[in-house]
Image (spheres, coloured by chain):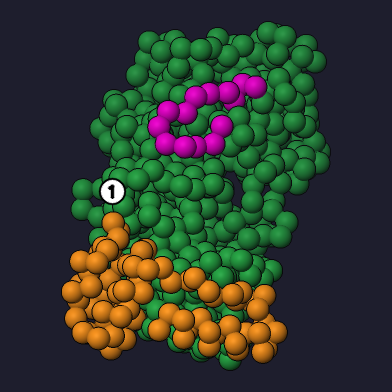
Amino acid sequence: MHARIADDVNKELHSRKASKMLGPLENTMNRRTFIRYLCISFTGIVTFNALGKNKYDIKLDSGYEIRNGWVLTTADLYDI
Amino acid sequence: MIFNLEELESPELKSDACIIGGGAAGITLARKLGSLGHDVILAEGGSLKYEQQSQDLYQGKVVGDQYYDLMATRLRFFGGATNHWAGHYAPLHSYDFTNKVPGIQTAWPIDYSAFNSYIDKAREIFPFRQITPSKPVLDGMFEKIDHITSPSPARFGPKFVDEIKASQNIRLILHANFTGVEHTDGNITKAIFKDFLNKSLKISAKHFVLACGGIENPRLLLHLNETLNTNFGNKSGLLGKKFTEHPMGNIGQFIITNQSNYDALNFRKEDIFEVDPHSDFFQPSEQFFKKHKTLNFFMAMVRPSEPEPEVHNQIMNDLLCTAPSLGEKISSRLLKKQLQCYGTILTSQEQEPIEDNRIALGEEKDQFGIRRPILYWRRTSTDREHIKKIAIEFARLLAEKDIARIKLYDWVVDSSLPVKTRRPGGHHHIGATRMSDGEESGVVDTNCLLYGTENFYVAGSSVFPSIGTASPTLPLVAMTLRLADHLNQQLIA
């Protein structure tokens, strides 16, 4: 999944000669995130939290979370 | 008329009003009273230009959080801090005159609408453009606000020096450093000044006004009480205390997720009066205060004036790491050139007034034997809690509306971490001689008269009990015009 995103984006970027705007995206996702993403994709439940909870990951009320400082919706995180 | 103290032949002068300090407040008061025909002496410690020997008198210590050097945060020559004023203007609101949070005293003892009429008069002095009316956004919880930065901030010294020089009613005395007063049971009879060669001048007047800035006003009053063995303005024990600033800083980064949703936040083009093209300012609505019980603040979404690919790349990479699915969607929109905006979130917040944040006298003395100030200042736990609560709510609403996503810095999310900011405050020195409706709860009364005296007033930002997120320069000029009306009534009575 990680590779697919990076490849697709880079392909497009190079083809549009717009790499200065975004830059290469290789290695953008770390291992922890990759594992999380796989977990979300395959199970769709929150068991992935145990794989590496950030110190500042906070669950807010009514469908919002803080992850790595980002204030995100549940849909942002779980691709619902 | 303008004189240097060292050139004066007489060691004593007499006037209707003696104004101590030639900054925005002092100059405004002198011009107004002079225009009404009163005999005014305006005593300025510095000169018409910057002089190091004068500026050195502003040395002092700061204890607590990171703050500016007290030598750098103010200027000691004619025109005062307007000589380096940035020219910002953001208005006070009616709710700024109230207690917004139970247990935190931010209410003013005077009426907002009556005070606001002086804001209109004060605006005539400044080259501010017309302000764009606020627009409710984000379910009515916030307002998109205009935030004016004057391209040519009013420098009161150069702006008014010729007028004062030509005035027959105003005598501007330069190098007149205030060192004390003579009084009889609170009736101030003379103010005492010295030049840098220690030559003395005594000025008799019906009324005296201390207008030396938000740090010097409390410092000089503490000095008077110490040397005279009095307790003027301090029956409440609040002289020098409840100092507040506008804690500022970049609290995070944002990336626009839907350009049309973001554009819908903005003013209609026909409503805009030269609004800053790179920043969008938001302030809470009364609805927000009722729901979240916080002090006032503003949030500015600041976009870079020039593209910064590295920063953009860093934000995107971070988002892809955290929320790959969302990152993928945004990447797709970026490729289609449907999104361009990213940047930082700048905040300025109203501070909780607490007694521990204060101006006190240090052990070290200046060349006139007056103890130098110590500013004790820190962000309170309430300040930290409020900015966290506010930032999360703002970010949550932007996410809910699919307008943008915000990444908050660790120190915002974790209040136990030290604040990281290059701009700890706005150089706004508020509240250390606060106005109240009784001497048990403040330092000056509603006419700015120092409690315990009959004729000694205080002018400037130090009298404000609170200031919301408004820049203090315009409100302090408004308050001074209000004081001028009061003194005029006293002088003609």
Which residues, given as a range, are shown in magenta?
B56-69
Judging depth in this view, the residue of B373 and B206 nearest the camera is: B373
* B386 to the left or right of A43: right
Q: Residue at x 63, y 60 (%)?
A: B149
* B71 to the left or right of B285: right
Q: Residue at x 60, y 87 (%)?
A: A11
- Check the image and report above or below for B440 versus B289: above
The amino acid marked with disc number 1 is: Thr
- Check the image and report above or below for B260 versus B419: below
Q: Is residue A68 magenta?
A: no
Per the rendering, the colour in which chain A appears is orange
Q: Quadrant of residue B444?
A: top left
Question: Dot 1 surroundings within 10 Å: few (below 14), some, or many (20 or more)?
Answer: some
SS for tag 1? Answer: helix
Judging depth in this view, the residue of B145 and A6 nearest the camera is: A6
Relative image position of residue A35 (x, y in whole percent): 31, 74
Per the rendering, the colour in which chain B appears is green
- Check the image and report above or below for B222 versus B297: above
- Chain under label 1? B
Q: How many marks?
A: 1
* Residue located beneath label 1 in the image: B382
Relative image position of residue B81 (x, y in whole percent): 63, 40
Q: Is residue B57 magenta?
A: yes
